[in-house]
Amino acid sequence: MICRHCKQTINYRTLQCPHCAEIQWRTLTAATVVTFFGLVIAGVALPLFVPHRARASTTPHLPVITISARELYTAYHNGPGAMNRRFAGHMARISGVVTSVAQDFATRSVVSLQSGHPVNDQMTMKDSETAAAAKLHTGEKVVIDCAHMSSIVGIPEGSDCTFESSSR
């Protein structure tokens, strides 16, 4: 490498020229800039062009915790922090009786499962489950798989939920 100030030959790893003590500022070549932005654009744009089924098939399978809606409510009401830790990295498979089906602010289907308490468990379904959720009836028994579980004031809430294939 050549020092830009004194034009002497120096090691390319040198940050300061040993001859004139000038700091060696690296410049980006056009190829470096094009490569960087190409990788950024590919990382952002590529997922938009991959078919939905191909993306879904690469999702890792989570271990499953099976629990009833009544047990889920009691457990979250008694210790929400412990339950959040228990469900972290696990799929929740909740069996219960439908009390209602509604839509949230984003028009996703929300299935309420009977908890045996004044407030019921709320499971927000994936968009792909909208048609199946619309066919549900109050009192119908279902099994719902949720990728994420949390609670608000001790009330269990599932998200990214699907109906277990054998239950619908």
Image (cartoon, rainbow, N blue to C red):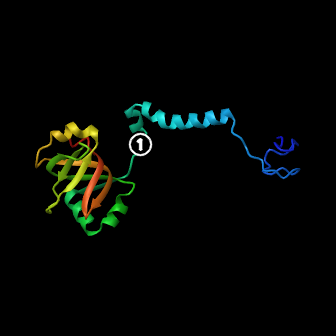
Q: Quadrant of the C terminus?
A: top left
Q: Is residue 157 left or right of residue 43?
A: left
Toward the viewer: 119 or 23? 23
Label total for image: 1
Q: Quadrant of the N terminus?
A: top right
Residue sitting at x 81%, y 42%: 4
Residue sitting at x 11%, y 44%: 137
Task: Residue 49: name its quadrant.
Answer: top left
Q: Residue furthest bottom?
A: 78
Q: Is residue 85 left or right of residue 104?
A: right
Toward the viewer: 37 or 103? 37
| Crowd class of label 1 (few under 14; some 14 to 19; many from 20; radius 10 Å) | few
Residue 168 drawn above or below residue 141: above
| Amino acid, disc 1 | Thr
Q: Is residue 135 left or right of residue 88?
A: left
Pointer 1 residue = 59
